[in-house]
Structure formats: structure tokens, C-alpha cells
Amino acid sequence: MDWERDRVKNLDACIKCSACTAQCPVAAVYPLFPGPKSAGPDVERFRLEGLAMDMGSLNDCSNCKTCEVTCPSGVRITEMILRAREKSQQTGQKDGKTTQRRIRDLILGRAEYLGKLGTVWPGMTNAVLGVQLVRGLMERTLGISQLAPLPAYKPKFRGSTGKRLGQKTVVYFPGCFATYNDSLTGRAVVKVLEHNGYDVSVPPFHCCGVPLQANGHFHEGRENVRKNLVLMEPYLQAKVPVITACTSCSLALKEEYPKEEASILGTERIGHQAYDLFEFLWELHERGELREEFKQVTVSLGYHAPCHLKAQGIGTPSLRLLRLIPGVNVNDLDAGCCGLSGSFGFKQERYKLAMQIGNPLFSCVKGCVTQGKFETMLTECGGCQVQIQHGSGVEAKHPIWILMQAYGLKLN
């Protein structure tokens, strides 16, 4: 979509049913947030007339995209709010942020740089971040909540660039969480794809740009998009699928990357060649190309569908695939947003709000574990994993690990 050209058409599709506000996880627990209909379509009509509006409430949007999933008319509400935030920056309108919060958002938006620093000596980084005095100082000076569950750093994930381009080649886009916080899951993804006969290429990608965008650094986010498209271009030309196991990254690749200027090679292809990992594996299953010599895995698990997976409109392919494995019992909790929403829940002024948003999910997880329905949670999103463990005390991991077990695969 050309946003400037189609924004009025997008706006007029709103039928004012308020379904988006009724389902908004932020509006449900924070009365001061007017809701996505008000912050989006309602106020957009005034913005189109050039009237200056209060931009403070736009920052209350967590970018979960639940409003867009809910909207019966397909109005791009979150996108409308993000563009309004960007426009306010360009016109110099005040957004209510203090200098401290601007610096904090500058830091949190650069997940890639934080990861590079954190993985130089991950053990020391984790030890320092585990000191309560340090966390207290971070809260007072940067506005990063001392109670928030900062993910631990692990040795950096490193993949190869692959040896050939062809029918059995795929590109893996690991994302920041797998690269810096969960390299073992990154390696497991590669292992499963290779087990199914694919040569996996992992170019030196940058952050997908979502953390930058969510923290108000739109220009820098687009720079990352352009850099990544340059790295993808030869693979896109050869019609090679681009796969990621991070739901926020896959949503960005499918929705944000195609919006880049047509002059950037690959822009017109990426939306059609980007896949969520389990979406890709399920398509292999449907074509009869997935290896399905699964071993018995007797286990009961809980499952949380990340908001950015729901926004892709592909259902829950990991659930469908795991249910093909003998012995696997997966409970789809469908208990709402976890509340973290990228870096939203790390912020001092958002931490309690994020926990309130996630409370129905945490209660459901704890209740199911108490009843003996399962002991471990599954979810594709690294942030959701961290938040679920923090809010419920129950282990959460990526679904790829059950597939690894069913295939009998081990990391070297």
C-alpha cells in the first residue's frame, strides 16, 4: 500500500463499530488510553485537515496489532497510529516524552547494537544485569524498569552463507532474539531445515527494524530494511524462500518490507517469498515433501499464539504440525496478549501495565499447570517466552524443540 495515497480510503473503511477498542489489550486495563479507534481513525480525520492534536496517547499503543486482526473492515489502525507518530516528529509536535525517555527509547530501539555488546562476554553481561543495584540505577537514569525480565545473552548465533542457489535452498533470517539471546534455537531451526534437505544460507542480516519503529526511530528502521533487502536481493531474484522463526520479524518481512521504494531491488518480491518457519514446514507437509518419520514424543504442552503471528492471518501452523507427532498433546490457551510487546513492558512507566495485560494469560498458565494439564509452554516469540516465564514461573520455549525431539536430532 502507498500510505500517503491510500490513507483516506483506508480511513473511510472504518464503520465505527469499536470492535478494535473492545479487544485492545491496553485499553482493557488503562482507562487513560482512548483506544485504537479514537487514536487512529477518529483523530486521523482531524490530522488530515492539518489540525494539531495531542500526540501523547499515541505512545500508549503497544503495536500488538490486535486492532487490525479484529477490524471487520481491514482498517490498518496500528499503521495509522505509527504514521501519525512519525508525522508528529517531522512537524516538531510534542509527544510528551522527557529527555530520559527519549534516551531510553533510543537504546531499546537498537536491539542489534545491544546484542553485539551483550554477546562480547555474555556471562559477565548477565551477571552485571542481575545485580539489583545496577537495575535500580538503570531505572533511575534510563527509565528501564528494575522489575522487567531482561532476556539473558548467550553466545552469538552464527550461520553460513550457503554454497549454492537452487530449488533446495532457503535463506534464514534469525532476528535479534535468536542471534543474541537464544542461539541454540537458531541452530535448531537450521538443523530441522537441513534435515528436510535444504541448504540454509544465513547472510549477515541487521535487525528487522521493528524495535526501531516501535521506539519512534522510523528513519533508522527503514535504513535497516534497505540494508537487509540488499542482502536478500540475489536470493529473491532466484525465488529462494526467506524464512524466520520470529513472528515479529516475519510480520515485518511480509508487511513492512514491501512498502519500501520500488527502486530498491527485492521490494516487490519479499512479501511473497517470506515465510514463518512453521508456515513453510506446513506447506511442505501439504505438498508431501516434509519428512514425517516422527518418533513418539509423549508430552503435554501449553501453547500461546503471539500477537504478531495472529496478525499474519496464517492461523497456528506450529500447532497443526506438532499434532502430527505421535504422543504430543498441545493445549491452545488463547488467553490474550502477554503484555511485553517487544520493549513496551521493559519501560518503567509501562511495566505494571504490561503485567496487567498479561495477567489473564499468566493465570491461565498457572491454573493449567496446577491442574496437571501441562508443565511447559510453547510460543514462537522470544519476548513472549521471557514474559510468560516472568509472569507465571513456567518454562516457555520455541516449538522447534519438540520437532527436534520428534526427528531425534541433536545439536553438534
Image (tube, rainbow, N blue to C red):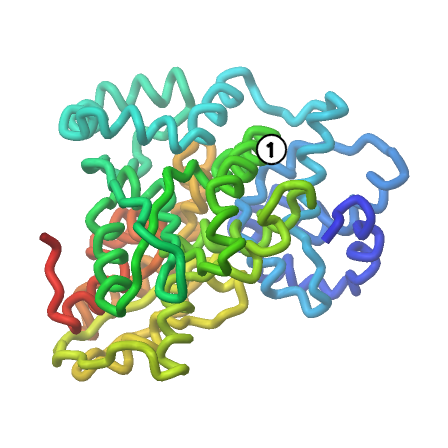
Q: Looking at the picture, tell me which residue is in the foreground, 285 or 56.
A: 285
Query: In the rendering, at what x and y percent does residue 35 appear?
Result: 65, 50
Residue type, numbered disc 1: Phe
Residue reaching furthest to the right: 49
The x and y percentages for residue 16 are 77, 62
Vertical comparison of 96 with 253: above or below: above
404, above or below 159, in the image: below
Residue hosting label 1: 218
Image point (73%, 67%), residue name: 73
Q: Can residue 355 be seen in this view?
A: yes
Whether residue 169 is situated above or below residue 135 in the rendered picture? below
Q: Position of residue 2 (x, y in %)?
A: 75, 49
In the image, taking residue 408 as reference, residue 395 lies left or right, namely right
On the picture, is 20 further left or further right than 359? right
Classify mark 1: residues with Cα within 10 Å, few (<14), some (14-19) or many (20+).
some
Does 390 sit left or right of 407 as displayed? right
Residue nearest the viewer, comparing 390 with 256:
256
* In-image side of 104 versus 61 (left or right): left
- Quadrant position of residue 85: top right
Residue that appears at 80% across and 54% down: 11
Residue lying at 47% horizontally and 31% vertically, measured from the top left = 109
